[in-house]
Amino acid sequence: MSRVCQLTGKRPITGNNVSHSNRKTKRVFAPNLHKKRIFIPETGKWVTLKICSTALRTINKLGIFAYLKKLGRKGVVTGVKL
């Protein structure tokens, strides 16, 4: 299972842990992903999405249907048929 948000496209990035003595070791910054089952009332269907918390906040603000339409206008492939 890849750690990529289906709606925003956020994925893990790498960086450094920096100790007090300024020694650097590699680390991974992973997105905060959640597997959510969401009902789309306009189509009457349930979809299961692996989304990050920022996408979940946007869905709560705009609604899932409006957010998916907005992403479709931007050309983002979400895998959800409207």
Image: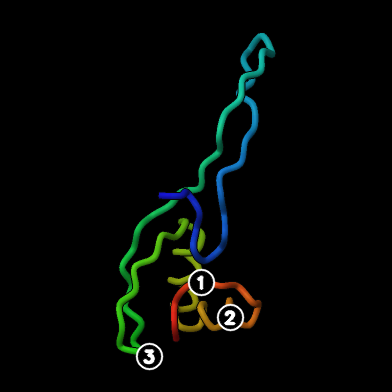
Quadrant in which the C terminus appears: bottom left
Q: Earlier in the sequence, mark 2 or mark 1?
A: 2
At horizontal 66% and vertical 13% (from top left) the residue drawn is: 23
At horizontal 47% and vertical 56% (from top left) the residue drawn is: 52
Where does residue 64 sit, x and y in percent of width and height?
Answer: 44, 77
69 in relation to 15, above or below? below
Residue type indicated by callout 2: Gly
Residue type indicated by callout 1: Thr
Query: Cα distance, mark 3 to mark 2?
Result: 16 Å
Residues marked 3 and 1 touching at CB (< 8 Å): no
Residues marked 2 and 1 touching at CB (< 8 Å): yes
Frontmost of labels 3 and 2 is 2
Where does residue 1 sit, x and y in percent of width and height?
Answer: 40, 49
Is residue 57 rendered to the left or right of residue 9?
left
Query: Cα distance, mark 3 to mark 1?
Result: 17 Å
Secondary-structure class at tag 2: helix
Residue type indicated by callout 3: Glu
Residue corresponding to mark 2: 72
Q: Earlier in the sequence, mark 3 or mark 2?
A: 3
Frontmost of labels 3 and 1 is 1
Where does residue 27 sit, x and y in percent of width and height?
Answer: 57, 28
Secondary-structure class at tag 3: loop
Secondary-structure class at tag 1: loop
Is residue 20 rendered to the left or right of residue 54?
right
Q: Which mark is residue 42?
A: 3
Packing grade of label 1 (10 A; few <14, some 14-19, many >=20) is some
Packing grade of label 3 (10 A; few <14, some 14-19, many >=20) is few
At horizontal 58% and vertical 80% (from top left) the residue drawn is: 72
Residue corresponding to mark 1: 78
